[in-house]
Image (spheres, helix red, strand yellow):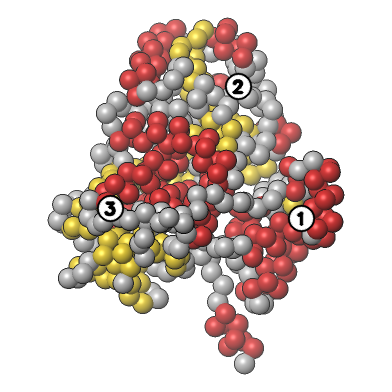
Amino acid sequence: MFDVLIIGAGASGCAVARELSRFRLSLCVLDRESDVCEGTTKANSAIVHAGFDALPGSLKAKLNVRGSRMMPELAKKLDFAFKNNGAFVLCFDKEQIPGLEELAQRGRLNGVEGVRVISGDEARQMEPALTDEVAAALYAPTSGIVCPFEMTLAFAENAYANGAEFRLSTCVTGIDKSDAGYVVHTDKGDIEAKVVINAAGVYADRLHAMVSSKPMNITPRRGEYMLLDKDAGGLVKHTIFQQPTKMGKGILVSPTVHGNLLLGPTAEDIEDKENTATTRSGLAEVRAKAQLSVKGIPFNKVITGFTGLRAVGDTHDFIIGECEDAKGFIDVAGIESPGLTSAPAIGEYVRDIVAGIMTLEEKPDFVDTRKGVIHFASLTREQQNELIKREPAYGSVVCRCETVTEGEILDAINRPLGATTLDGVKRRTRAGMGRCQAGFCSPKTIAMIAEKLGIGLLDVKKNGTYNKESEAADNA
């Protein structure tokens, strides 16, 4: 029996795991996918929000600002990409300026530093590519951008290094209350735990309904994006938002930490919790609305489009707490924007809830740092040469678009919670994220995965799990 079982290995679940791994607990993280970061976390805007949008007094406001303040130190300790680039929120009509002033005041009440409203001319001085139609802008200097894959993997690997167990490719089929806590039924057998934490994204309502009669509804909100090549990444320096509506923060134009340009997302509430298809109309909307904010967007540099799902709760706030009628079952649900920013603060918040259920004793040997995959392309020429001398595999480039080497891919496969799929390698190394979108590097990457995992080439998946039993049967 585990002390704590976390269901869901996205940003929130892994942040909670990392925080709880500080203590003498038997801790397990469960996910139906073959890797962490396969759900909502893998397709979002990658923004560290300053915290001016959430209503004062809400959990979103509290955890957003706390998470934003935690991010720079966490990025250094856990070795993931983060940049404090600041953000604008644009309005295109002078009559909308009071709405910006309201946002600024909301930000001040939430504790956001430096937020202010500036004129369109001042905004264009800072961002020359802004359109002439921009009448004014809210400026938030504490906003930032992050790599959501690296951040979530960092939380997971650090939790793993501190004793957390991860059971991936394991799907929950039911949950029953027991005298000692809960029995979680899965397609790989039963798991017992004293405390269960429900961080299952768009499926959190279904898990909640397995133990509680209190209603919860999570609506998937589909958001479509365009990603442009690095040739377009310098068009803007800041994250450019449009004045928000009840459906979200509008279409953004933002650089990424890796030098691309990101446009999106749309906002469409849907019923299908698996529908991540892009649509002609959705991408057309992204294109049209992005041009309201920024001129000269080179749409001929688009290298891919993708869709993410946000988990929207009926309360329009994060739903985090112990169920009234299911003691020891903690919901971490409705974690839509600014959920990525809030993740480390959510970890702290859930830690305090767990501390109210069981005694938490700190580990004297907790390790709060982690070293990520070495990114060869980011090194100086001298550092590259020295690395190749030590590890010759770093001298062989596999992904030319992103200059990813054999050494990086081997590290991604061999490290704790290592990659077992093409997408797993891609998220850890960026192999396949460049201009050709894995058109040339996939065969070599597949061969490396197959060799290291001891499986057949045809058993390597883009995502999902590999099946050694089926391979054994085929070879019998």
Q: Secondary structure at mark 3?
A: helix
Which mark, by number, is residue 294? 2
Residue type highlighted by circle 1: Thr
Q: CA distance from mark 1 to mark 2?
A: 35 Å
**Residue beneath disc 1:** 405
Which quadrant is home to the N terminus? Answer: bottom left
**Residue beneath disc 3:** 354
Q: Where does residue 295 sit, x and y in percent of width and height?
A: 64, 20
Q: Is residue 138 left or right of residue 371?
A: left
Q: Residue at x 61, y 14 (%)?
A: 126
Give neighbour class at mark 3: few <14, some 14-19, many 20+ (Cα, 10 Å): many
Q: Is residue 378 left or right of residue 212?
A: right
Residue type highlighted by circle 3: Val
Residue type highlighted by circle 2: Val
Would you identify the image quadrant in which residue 388 lies?
bottom right
Q: Residue at x 32, y 48 (%)?
A: 350
Q: Where does residue 320 sit, x and y in percent of width and height?
A: 28, 45
Q: CA distance from mark 3 to mark 2?
A: 46 Å
Q: Nearer the viewer, residue 340 or 301?
A: 340
Mark 1 / mark 3, whichever is N-terminal: 3
| 101 is higher (above) or lower (below) than 308 | above
Please identify, in this view, whether the residue under mark 1 or under mark 2 is nearer the observer.
Answer: 1
| 214 is higher (above) or lower (below) than 242 | below
Which quadrant is home to the C terminus? Answer: bottom right
